[in-house]
Image: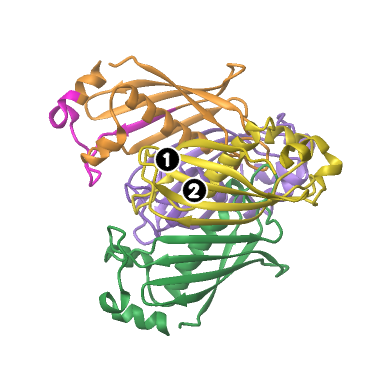
Chain colours: A green, B orange, C yellow, D purple
Amino acid sequence: MNQSVTRSEIRVRYRETDQMAVAWHGNYIEWFEVARTDWLRNLGLSYRELEARGILLPVLRILCDYVRPARYDDILVIETKLQSYNGVRLAFSYIARTFQEESVVASGQTEHTFADAELRPIRLARREPEIHRLLEG
Amino acid sequence: MNQSVTRSEIRVRYRETDQMAVAWHGNYIEWFEVARTDWLRNLGLSYRELEARGILLPVLRILCDYVRPARYDDILVIETKLQSYNGVRLAFSYIARTFQEESVVASGQTEHTFADAELRPIRLARREPEIHRLLEG
Amino acid sequence: MNQSVTRSEIRVRYRETDQMAVAWHGNYIEWFEVARTDWLRNLGLSYRELEARGILLPVLRILCDYVRPARYDDILVIETKLQSYNGVRLAFSYIARTFQEESVVASGQTEHTFADAELRPIRLARREPEIHRLLEG
Amino acid sequence: MNQSVTRSEIRVRYRETDQMAVAWHGNYIEWFEVARTDWLRNLGLSYRELEARGILLPVLRILCDYVRPARYDDILVIETKLQSYNGVRLAFSYIARTFQEESVVASGQTEHTFADAELRPIRLARREPEIHRLLEG
C-alpha cells in the first residue's frame, strides 16, 4: 500500500469560528477533504480529473477525535496517510497539529469507496489499473 | 408582476455563529436562498423540479445591509418579494426580522437570470410560458 | 438515563449540496448539532441559556456512517437519543431518515463533556444538580 | 488613504461547490473575509490581535457581482484594496480572478465600522492613533 504522507496547511478562517471562540468542530471534515485532495495530488492524481472521468470517491464513514481547540487564524498542519486499500474501498487517517506548537489538535479517519457517476461501487483494478497500482504503491 | 410575499422562519444554528458571538454575516446569503425557494414553492414552483427540467436560476448579484446582529438560537423571519422581472432576469428583496421583536436585522436583494444547464440565459416566456405568466402575476 | 427521543426535521438547503448533486457529507455534523439542541430543548433545557450560565458542551468525538445520499430539498428526519451519561461526559446517537421513505440515510454519534467557559470539564451533579437529574431521567 | 493592494490565493474546496457544479455564490463572502484579513496583515495588523484588544470590524454591507462561475479546484486570486476610510468607517473592494486565465470571476465591496466588544462604533483616531495613521497611509 502506498506509504506517502502529505502535510497540508490550513489557516482557520473567521467564518470557521463559533461563539465558543474556537474553530467549530465540523470544519475538520472540510479540512480533511482538502487534505486528502492534496494527498491524491501528491500522487499525481487530480480529484477534479478523476470526477471528470466518472470516478468518484464518496464518503462511507467519518470519525474525528478532538484533543484541544484550534483558534481563529491558527495555521493547522494536517498530516494525511492512506490507511487501507483493497481495490474498491480505501481509508485515510489525518492528524491535525498547530503549526507552531506541533501538539495534536484533532485526529480522524475517513472511509470511501470508488464509485461511478451513479454512485455505484467500481473495482479500480479493472477500471483504472494505473491508479490501482499507484494506490498499491 | 407577481406581488406575493412569503415569510420564512430560520432558527440560527450554532455553526452559524462566529467568535463575535453573533450570526456570521455571510449566512444571510444562505438564508435568502432558502427564503426565495420558499417564495417559488408558494407559487407552486419547486426549484428542485425546475433544475431537473434544465431551468436554473444562477445569481448575478447579491447585496446585504446589516442593521443589528442576530444571535444563536434566534428565530428570524425573512420576508421575501419579487422586486423585478423582465422575462429573462428577476430580482428578489428580503427583510430579516427577529421573530419576537419584529425589528429589522438585515435586508438584501439578489438578482438572477434564468439559464439552461450550461448556464446560458434563456427567455422564460418562450421556453416556459406558464412559469412566465406566474411571475408576471 | 433519560430515554427521550426527539425527531428533528431538516430540509436540505441548496448551499448544502455539492457537485456530486447530493448533500455534502459534512453537513450531517451541523444537522446533528441542530438535533441535539432540539433534544435538550425538549427536556426544557435551552443550550443558549446553558452557555449564558457558563456551561458549555464541547464535542470530544464525532462519528458518522453514510448509507445513501440525501438530495437537495429532501426533508430529513433526525431521531436523537441520549446514549450515555456519567455525570461529566455524555453521548448522543442520531439516525437520519428521509421524510417520505423512512429509509436510513445516515447515522452517527457524538461525545461531549460538560465544561466551563474556559473549556475545563465540570461535574454536573455538583454544579447543576437539577440538570444532572434531568439527564439521569 | 492607504493604497496597498494585496493578492490572496484561494483554492475552491469541494465543500464549496453546489449541484450546479460551480462554486456556490455565497462562498465569495467568506473568501473576501480571508482577503481583507490578508490586506490588514500586509499592513502589519493582525485582525486576531485587534479583536484581542477589543477592536472589532463588523460588516455593515456586502455587495457581490458574479461575472462567470468558478469551479472546484480552481485557484482564485483576490485583489483587495481599501476603498474609503473616514476615521470610523471603512470599505474594501475585491476582484476575484482565476489564476490561469486572469479573467474576472466576481467583484465585490464590503463596508465596515470599527467597533468595541459591545459592537458600539469607535473613533479609531482617538482610540488607536497608530492604526488610524496606517489606514490614512
Q: For mark 1, give the secondary structure.
A: loop
Q: Nearer the viewer, residue B128 or D134?
A: B128
- Seen in the picture, residue A22 relative to B80 is either above or below; the reply is below
The residue that appears at 50% across and 33% down in the rendered structure is: B28
Q: Nearer the viewer, residue C9 or A10?
A: C9
Kindly identify which chain the residue marked by label 2 belongs to.
Answer: C
Which image quarter: residue A115? bottom left
Q: Is residue D117 visible?
A: no
Q: For mark 2, give the secondary structure.
A: helix
Asked whether residue B118 is drawn in magenta, I would say yes
The residue that appears at 25% across and 15% down in the rendered structure is: B137
Mark 2 burial class by Cα count in 10 Å: few <14, some 14-19, many 20+: some
Pinpoint residue A28: horizontal percent, then vertical percent: 57, 57
Determine the CA span between mark 2 and mark 1.
9 Å
Q: Are marks 2 and 1 in contact (CB under 8 Å)?
A: yes
Residues shaded magenta: B109-130
Q: Is residue C33 visible?
A: yes
State whether discs 2 and 1 lie on one chain: yes
Kindly identify which chain the residue marked by label 1 belongs to.
Answer: C
Q: On residue C27, which mark appears?
A: 2
The residue singled out by tag 1 in the image is C12
For the C terminus of chain C, which image quadrant?
top right
Q: Nearer the viewer, residue D131 or B26?
A: B26
Pinpoint residue A34: horizontal percent, then vertical percent: 49, 62
Pinpoint residue C85: horizontal percent, then vertical percent: 71, 49
- Seen in the picture, residue A46 relative to D93 is either above or below; the reply is below
For the N terminus of chain C, which image quadrant?
top right
Amino acid type, residue under disc 2 in the picture: Asn
